[in-house]
């Protein structure tokens, strides 16, 4: 275990694995005044903690490539990214054709939050542990017909340890030919469109089929991220991340899936997004035609 290396990776585990305990002990030793620990004391505590939990947090570097693109849904990216950031010794690349900020499809003020890619397709590491694609419309449909994006995903997906997505990102993977014969999920109203791309539509918040891991719509990104962290590290590590994030969802309504939502709410959304579904179906059929006519 390289103590100096891990001292540069001081992040959330310092809180999860004992930093507050150090503060408590120092406070009891100095009843007259509560003082923050010195930087040297904090660093020493970090190093000791890293050594103590080396079997839990150690391991080889994990390289993650996350596609970003105009018209994606911000939460599809941010949910998994927040979870992935908890990994020690990781390398995360936000991938796009160039390094210009891309807009997102999120409604309201978040639409004004641009995402800046960190790595171009050309600069992407040759080998990725995780290839991830977020969803979002109308961006998904544009990406499903973008030759450069599809070629990049196909190339990286052939060697990535895990090929993954959240929401309609699975449609993009399917258009790149990466889900043929695999069980996969997507946003609930576009899930069955996956069959047009050779995938096996499967209901589930997270669907794992060999090294393909797909998440359902939007908020499933956190669940998906935790599942992947458990596969990359361990269940204990993933549970520590979940506790750190205090991810204990208790929604005010039991309407988070079409099976649970009341009929009027479900029909309202189906009517509102009928055009989106038709677009998804037509785009998927065109994508499959290209896959069938192209090289195998």
Image (tube, grey):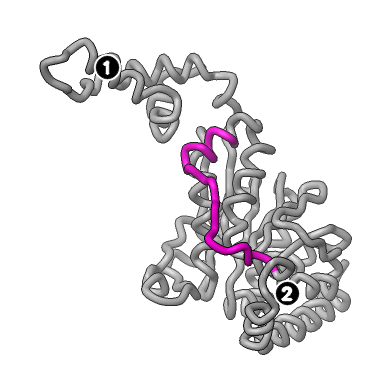
The dot on residue 190 is 2
Would residue 193 be found to the left or right of residue 225 on screen?
Answer: right
- Quarter of the image for residue 122 reads bottom right
> Residue 117's x, y, as percent?
46, 61
* Residue 182 can be seen, yes or no: yes
| Viewer-side residue, 251 vs 97 | 251
Left or right of 11? Residue 69 is right
Mark 2 burial class by Cα count in 10 Å: few <14, some 14-19, many 20+: many
Q: Quadrant of residue 102?
A: bottom left
Picture residue at 77% right of the left edge, 79% below the top = 284
Q: Find disc 1 in the rendering and name its residue.
A: 41
Marks 1 and 2 sit apart, C-alpha to C-alpha, by 53 Å
Which residues fall within the magenta stretch? Answer: 239-257
Number of on-image labels: 2
Magenta stretch holds residue 17: no
Query: Residue, x 73% and y 52% (percent of image)?
Result: 213
Depth check, front residue: 142 or 201: 201
What is the x, y in percent for residue 90?
Answer: 53, 38
Give coordinates of residue 21: x percent, y percent.
35, 20
* Label 2 secondary element: loop
Q: Image height check: is 49 above or below 186? A: above
**Label 1 element class:** helix
Earlier sequence position, callout 1 versus callout 2: 1
In reply to whether residue 244 is colored magenta, the answer given is yes
Residue at x 50%, y 75% (from the top left corner)? 105
Give how far across and how far down residue 95 sits, in percent: 53, 59
Crowd tier of the residue under label 1, counting other residues whose Cα lies within 10 Å: few below 14, some 14–19, many 20 or above: few
Give above or below for 127 relative to 151.
above
């Amino acid at each position: 275990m390289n103590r100096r290396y891990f001292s540069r990776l001081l992040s959330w585990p310092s809180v999860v694995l004992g930093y507050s305990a150090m503060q408590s002990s120092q406070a009891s030793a100095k009843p007259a005044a509560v003082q923050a620990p010195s930087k040297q004391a904090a660093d020493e505590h970090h190093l000791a903690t890293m050594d103590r939990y080396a079997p839990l947090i150690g391991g080889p570097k994990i390289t993650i490539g996350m596609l970003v693109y105009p018209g994606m849904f911000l939460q599809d990216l941010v949910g998994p990214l927040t979870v992935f950031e908890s990994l020690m010794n990781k390398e995360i690349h936000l991938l796009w054709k160039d390094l210009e900020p891309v807009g997102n499809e999120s409604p309201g003020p978040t639409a004004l939050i641009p995402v800046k890619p960190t790595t171009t397709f050309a600069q992407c590491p040759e080998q990725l542990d995780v290839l991830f694609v977020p969803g979002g419309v109308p961006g998904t449909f544009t990406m499903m017909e973008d030759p450069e994006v599809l070629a990049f995903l196909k190339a990286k997906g052939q060697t990535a340890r895990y090929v993954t997505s959240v929401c309609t990102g699975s449609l993009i993977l399917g258009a790149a030919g990466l889900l043929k014969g695999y069980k996969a999920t997507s946003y609930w109203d576009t899930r069955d469109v996956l069959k047009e791309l050779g995938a096996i539509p499967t209901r589930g918040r997270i669907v794992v089929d060999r090294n393909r891991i797909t998440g359902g719509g939007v908020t499933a990104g956190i669940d998906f991220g935790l599942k992947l962290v458990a596969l990359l590290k361990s269940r204990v590590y993933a549970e520590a991340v979940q506790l750190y994030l205090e991810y204990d969802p208790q929604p005010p309504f039991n309407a988070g899936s079409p099976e649970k939502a009341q009929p009027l709410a479900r029909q309202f959304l189906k009517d509102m997004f009928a055009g989106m579904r038709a677009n998804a179906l037509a785009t998927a059929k065109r994508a499959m035609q290209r896959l069938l006519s192209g090289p195998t």
